[in-house]
Image (cartoon, rainbow, N blue to C red):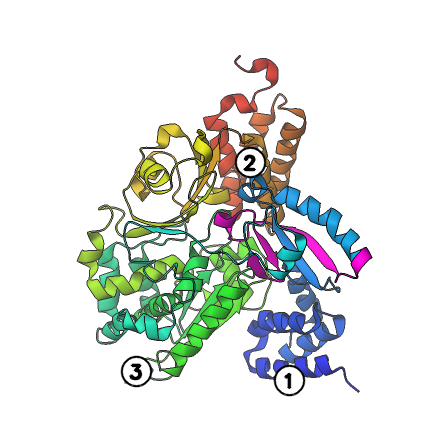
Amino acid sequence: MDDPKLMDLQTKLDEFAPTGRSALLPALHHTQKLFGYIPQAAASRIAASLHIPLANVHGVIDFYTLFYRQPVAETVIHVCNDPVCAFAGSDSLFKNFYREVPHQAASGGLETIALERSPCLGLCEHAPALLVQGMATAGAAGQSWQDIITGNFGRPHTQITREVDILTSNCGKGAPTWLAAYEASGGYQAFRKALGMSPAEVISQVKASGLVGRGGAAFPTGVKWEGAANAPGSPKYVVCNADEAEPGTFKDRVMMESDPHRILEGMLIAAYAIGANKGYMYIRGEYIHQFEVMAQARQEAMTVGYIGERVLGSDFSFDLELRLGAGAYVCGEETALFESIEGKRGLPRIKPPFPITHGLFGKPTVINNVETLANVPYILSNGAEAYRKIGTERSPGPKLFCLSGDVEKPGLYEVPFGVTFRHVLYDLAGGVRGGRKMQATLFGGAAGAFATEKDLDVRLSFEDLKAAGLPLGSGVIMVFDDSRDLKQILLRLARFFAEESCGKCFPCQIGTQRQLEILQNIASYGTSAGDREQLEDVARTMTDASICGLGQTAGSAVMSAIQQWQDLFKPARERKE
């Protein structure tokens, strides 16, 4: 008799079969949920049902850190090891767990538990952060392993501070804003208005608003939409990039778990504007709860006719699929994300061609970040002129900033572009924790650059930050006080890139490893002659020769530190007394 779990899997695979290879990620997730891992017999069935070579199935399994080919423990605990969580005690937490759990298991028959160090979990405001069986726990320092495993000490609740109330108006309420409440607050009126306009008029409004991408690249949204709308070929696709894995970033997580319909409305407007009848939302693998919230919101939208055939009686039809990633930072790069949706290893493509002409499945595609799409309903409802009254002339609109680290009130901050860094850090966030002095603040995440006290009066806008040599990135502001070891910060950032490099191009694959080796030696033995020059050479090579943004920015923070603290990279005999 066939294994009942394999029979269950085959039933699901029969549903997936018409989709072909692009169903691979959902099939692997379903399999791992059934078995706790992906056994050989299941991988073989997946390969046969989806018509994929078995070697390719294994290649995809091995690419993602959250898939397992061998049995694992009953409970898997991921412990974040990024700088913020490490300084908040995650290393000690990991060591204590490692000592206590095996002893307790031996004496009391405790279920098997596996501990894994993990890069940023998108819970930076709750450091030290953990995932227990995929569910987030927060502020775990000082908690017993029993409470952590059972979740008895509560779930994360993010502090949200607003100077403008647009993107986060429905956030911070402790529960998702479901359809009825979203519509009661004016939700989907912008989409209804868009259906009464021509696609070109919708694009014109978005272009006039000055909205640019909030994921880090800052490309003009309306220009991107116009390019895809005018590109030859069909079908066309709209994709929401919710693979938020940049250390220090958690804004998309808060938006998804609190206000899912705002994101869906933005996607619907984008799809109508470019003529796309199909969309995908790709959510990072660590965001299981957020994936479930978005899935329920999608079902609500389908039930009332916002998603489906002839939406609201119009000629516009739209279908949306959700995809859950499986642990790969590189999939936040747009073309790697496409590869992942298509059922392949998430390796970035060489550009050009660009997504607006050759994107998902080789077709014209618009891909936008969660925060970018969340701006769109306000623009359509209130007009481009009203939107441009917020922020600055060259950086219009509101912006979400993620504050974490040594700050009194870590959390999510919605402010108009143009306020100063000092205002956000001291007036809104209460300053550096414990009254200490700020030593450094990392802007833009692991791929960012360091600010110091001389930058406190820089305005938070694209133009002012660029002039100061600081990236806006995805809105990361990671604060470190004067007690922190800068070498350890850089070492952890370097380890992150070395572990997350996909290995497709040698400049990134080898460069990130070499950068890590040099910083390990500096942290352990001090700076040697030539270390600085070697770091600069590695960073320049990665920046100039890597094929995607991961490698191109993997040395950014190190280069920034070299410029800010030159003595840090000098041998002891050369330093100033």
Q: Residue 11 has which mark?
A: 1
| Tag 1: amino acid | Thr
Seen in the picture, residue 461 relative to 568 is either above or below; the reply is: below
Label 3 and label 2: CA atoms lie apart by: 52 Å
Mark 2 vs mark 1, foreground winner is 2
Horizontal and vertical percent position of residue 497 = 58, 45
Q: Earlier in the sequence, mark 3 or mark 2?
A: 3
Q: Earlier in the sequence, mark 3 or mark 1?
A: 1
Q: Residue furthest bottom?
A: 1
Q: Could you say which quadrant of the image residue 251 lies in? A: bottom left
The N terminus appears in which quarter of the rendering?
Answer: bottom right
Horizontal and vertical percent position of residue 555 = 52, 38
Task: Let me know if residue 513 is in the magenta part.
Answer: no
Left-right relation of 565 to 521 = left
Residue in the picture at 64% in, 64% down: 60
Give the labeled residue for mark 3.
312
Q: Nearer the viewer, residue 57 or 263?
A: 263
Q: Secondary structure at mark 3?
A: helix
Query: In the rendered image, is residue 346 in sight?
Result: no
| Tag 3: amino acid | Leu
Specify the segment rendered in magenta. 107-136
Q: Secondary structure at mark 2?
A: helix
Label 2 and label 1: CA atoms lie apart by: 48 Å
Label 3 and label 1: CA atoms lie apart by: 33 Å
Left-right relation of 372 to 500 = left
Seen in the picture, residue 550 relative to 278 is either above or below; the reply is: above
Horizontal and vertical percent position of residue 269 = 31, 69
Residue in the picture at 60% in, 26% down: 531
Give the labeled residue for mark 2.
489
